[in-house]
Image (cartoon, rainbow, N blue to C red):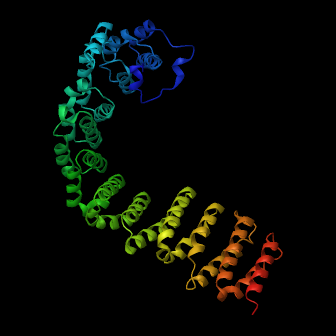
Amino acid sequence: MTNSNETYCTFTLSGDVTAGGLPSEDEISKDLESSDSKVKRHALKAAIMAMLGGESMPRVLMQVIRYCITTQDKPLKKLMMLYWEVVPKYQESTSDEIIRATAEGVQLKRKLLPEMILVCNALMNDLNHPNEFVRGSMLRFMCKIKDEEILGPLIPSIKSCLQHRHQYVRKNAALAVFHAHKLFGENLIPDGPDLMNDFIRSETDIAARCNAFLMLFNESEELAIEFLAEHIENVSSYGDGFALLVLELTRRICRRDPNQKSRFVRVLFQMLSSESAAVSFEAAWTMVSLSSAPSAVRAAASTYASLLNSQNDNNIKMIILERLEELKKKNSKVLQEVLMDILRALSSPNPDVCKKVLDVTMDIVTSRNVSEVVTTLKKEVAKTQDADLEKGVVYRHMLIQAIHGCATRYPIVAESVIHTLMDFLSSDGAMQVIIFVREIIEQYPD
């Protein structure tokens, strides 16, 4: 049978209190009576570690309520939230109750511990605390509570925090309302979506607005679409998190009903030029996943090419190149338009990125752009003569192979290519150069 404590475990603690073994329940209870906050913190952390290890520690609960619940020490308050998360909140069912419920075929109803009434009162006091940090932290803790009997009495206080003057409180209040409605919507907070709809229209903080839209996105899709339609001009100023939610909403709706695409085309094109690389990337991916129109693919390809040259992280470059490779399978003609922009990524010091760039671009070289491509490759191969170049010989071999491929397919550049390759007869790639030059001469003897 799964330990009830494990259900509530969403964190880990450092093992500094376990040095020399955990103190006993009596020792923890005694330390909690201390007037020194540091001693209390150490004792409470030990109690949490013990309960995570399977110990019930029933006597500690009342000690925490008596000696810690009114503390103003912030670290101790944080530890208390972790304690409330793992502490058993229900009475253990007797064997007779279990047998009776099994015989009747009904689910055994758990009974809340009487001490939890005092705990609920303490949680409510923190939700109404004059300090915004205490309020906000408690609202964040509300998102971890999965017990209807505990959440129920706290709903009015959570709602009141939506009107708090400080944005830290409001943004966490929005998440708490979302959590409560998601778990017990019709029972505890049936007016949650309407409440959040009113809240988001008057909210000015980016994070709080994003959290409110997150709830509408998950709990009331129609209200989310309605808000988006009314504020579509301002989406770019609502932050990256909000924009990413809008993109997820777009994908969800358009996959379910393709006729809705026209409602979101405008906002998608708007997000392609976002200052956030994450938003631009997701917008480009959303665009091509929902539409195969040349204008949509062209806009997405242009965005990918721009991101490829503006990002420094090699992993990001590789991901973008993989997306471009996917586009190439069905839209090679469109990709030819951004070919030279993609080749600019050869400036990357990473040979894997350069290899991927060449893999993507060499298949879409045409007679119209081969001269430009070969000129770029010749400039790059000339750079490999620099002894300080990190990519060195491996990069040179890749470039010579790419140049050879262009020359064998398009005789117009063959003559200029031979002179370039001959310069490397004395280098490490001499044998490769000789073979390529011989093939070109055999293929185009004139």
Image quarter of the N terminus: top left
Q: In the displayed orientation, state which residue is furthest to the right.
A: 426
Q: Is residue 418 above or below residue 25?
A: below
Residue in the image at 45% along x and 8% along y = 27
Task: Note whether 305 is above or below 138 in the view shown.
Answer: below
Query: Of residues 36 and 87, which is closer to you in this image?
Result: 87
Q: Nearer the viewer, residue 286 or 267?
A: 286
Residue 123 picture location, percent across and down: 26, 25
Direction from residue 49 to residue 388 in the image, left or right:
right
Residue in the image at 36% along x and 23% along y: 80
Image position of 297 (left or right of 19): left
384 and 204: which is toward the camera: 384
Residue 273 makes an appearance in the image: no
Residue 160: quarter of image: top left
Quarter in which the C terminus is drawn: bottom right
Vertical relation: 425 (above or below) 269? below
Q: Quadrant of residue 430?
A: bottom right
Query: In the rendering, at what x and y percent does residue 257 appear?
Result: 27, 59
Residue 269 visible in the picture = yes
How far from the left and from the top, in percent, is residue 24? Answer: 47, 8
Count of number-bearing discs: 0
Q: Position of residue 20 (x, y in %)?
A: 57, 14
Relative to residue 225, is residue 56 depicted above or below?
above
